[in-house]
Amino acid sequence: MSVKLLTKTSKAITKMGKFIDFDKSKRRFYNNLYLDDYKIVVKMALAKEKGSKEDFRIEKFDLAKYTYLLAYD
């Protein structure tokens, strides 16, 4: 998938992957947008926990080091 997003440095993001994963410690499923150029992931919980204020998280992430459940377009 090719996406044209511009950052502060005006570098276009060309590689973005989407995948679903499961956090065993929090027992939650996440929808993820992985920005390969920057090795970061935007994690969005599929079901929001009661009382949770967290809508999404941004983390430094190397996709090659982890196992995910499902990749999709």
Image (spheres, rainbow, N blue to C red):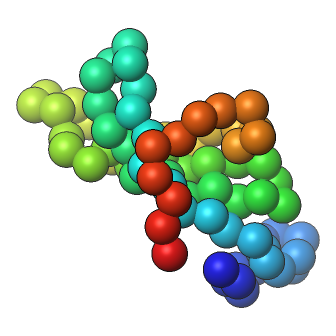
The extreme top residue here reads 25
Residue 7 position in % (x across, y down): 77, 71
Q: Nearer the viewer, residue 4 or 21?
A: 21
State left or right for residue 33 relative to residue 40. Answer: left
State left or right for residue 26 relative to residue 72. Answer: left
* Callout count: 0
Can see residue 60? Answer: no
Which of the 4 quarters of the picture holds residue 50? top left
Q: Which residue is drawn at 88% across and 76% down?
A: 11
Q: Which residue is drawn at 84% across and 61% down?
A: 37
State left or right for residue 60 relative to residue 10. Answer: left
Residue 24 position in % (x across, y down): 38, 19
Q: Residue at x 39, y 33 (%)?
A: 22
- In the displayed structure, 31 sits above or below 6; it is above
State left or right for residue 2 relative to residue 12. Answer: left
Can see residue 8? Answer: yes
- In the displayed structure, 70 sits above or below 63; it is below
Which of the 4 quarters of the picture holds residue 3? bottom right
Which quadrant of the figure contains the N terminus? bottom right
Residue 45 position in % (x across, y down): 32, 44
- In the displayed structure, 14 sits above or below 72; it is below
Q: Residue at x 62, y 64 (%)?
A: 17
Q: Which of 14 and 53 is in front in this view?
A: 14
